[in-house]
Amino acid sequence: MHWTYTQQLPATYIATPLRQQLIDWRLPSHLIHDLRIHQRVLVNGAYRSMNQLVYGGDTVQLTFLPADFKEPFPNVDPDSAATVAVLYESADLLVINKTRGSKTHPNQPGERGTTLNHVAAYLGPNQPGPYILSRLDQETTGALLMTKTPAVVPIMIRHIADKQVQRTYLAWVHGHLTGDGVFTDPIGRDPLDKRKRQVNGDHAQPAVTHYHVCDHREQATLIQLRLETGRTHQLRVHLAAAGHSLIGDPLYGTTTDTNRLRLHCWQLTFPQPFAVNDARTTVTAPVPDDFDQFS
């Protein structure tokens, strides 16, 4: 098994050392090293050293082997008990519309019934994946980004770290939130409850959430949220700390809140691996039919 990628540089491409182009593609240094040592990087069909220039019109070919990746994917048992709603699929990437109540991934070996198990069954036995790039809580619905091949895992992880993957959510919250704004309180562990996080908690890390008010009801507000960072429970913690907990949040909401969680990952925007331009792919997940049905 191997994975080969061939990319022709556009005519307008400015001559660049091959190594720099691989770095621009977000390849980590150990993969660049393996490509060089084993001469699995070809330019116009011939090996070229990393310091040589590549030009517009050149064709760059990269070949990766399983040995290049220590543990490219978790060992997941396929489970075809549920269908997968595919929103976008390419040779390397997959975006699905996750349903409410489905865990994103197994926590124990042999566990089945999670979204990852269902996607593994959808991809079939000849695929080494999947690998989840964006996580959603069990009661959160919407767009979930995955890779199908190990070669693009480190690339997409670096894109996420560089804030090149944009995640936009829709949510109904308690109370009347007004205007647009940003939450910047750092988030850490709750010292009294290991399930929870809190602003300025133990080992707090920076957390940034942008919000935009879309609509109001008598005692609720529909908002659009954009994550700049990705801390555990970030949206739920920031909103609860602001006094506008998510409707249906059993962990950070009110004790009498029995509605289902009204949080939906509405849109993902991301770059393509090995792209030679700044084009982005945007995928939108339809909201559940009952998203705005609550008391």
Image (spheres, helix red, strand yellow):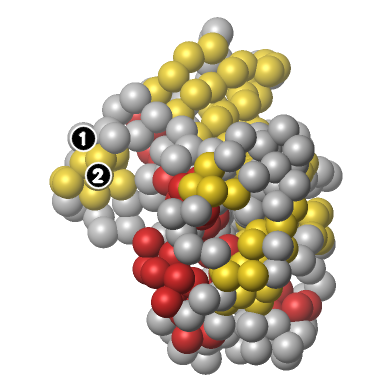
- Picture coordinates of residue 176, whole percent (x, y): 55, 15
**Which structural element holds mark 2?**
strand
Circles 2 and 1 in contact, beta carbons < 8 Å: yes
Marks counted in the figure total 2
Q: Write the residue at 62% across / 26% down.
A: 224
Question: Which of the pair 85/102 is nearer the observer?
Answer: 85
- Picture coordinates of residue 25, whole percent (x, y): 54, 51
Residue on which disc 2 sits: 188
Give the distance between the C-alpha atoms of the residues marked 2 and 1, in whole angstroms.
6 Å
* Disc with the residue nearer the chain's start (2 vs 1): 2
Q: Write the residue at 57% across / 29% down.
A: 225
Query: Mark 2 packing: few (<14 Cα in 10 Å), some, or many (20+)?
Result: many
Query: Mark 1 packing: few (<14 Cα in 10 Å), some, or many (20+)?
Result: some
Q: Can residue 5 be seen in this view?
A: no
Q: Quadrant of the C terminus?
A: top right
Residue kind at label 1, given as amino acid type: Asn
Q: In which quarter of the image is the N terminus?
A: bottom right
- Picture coordinates of residue 253, whole percent (x, y): 45, 39
Position of 126 with respect to 65 (left or right) is right
Q: Quadrant of residue 287?
A: top right
Q: Write the residue at 75% across / 78% down.
A: 123
Residue on which disc 1 sits: 200
- Picture coordinates of residue 30, whole percent (x, y): 37, 68
Residue kind at label 2, given as amino acid type: Gly
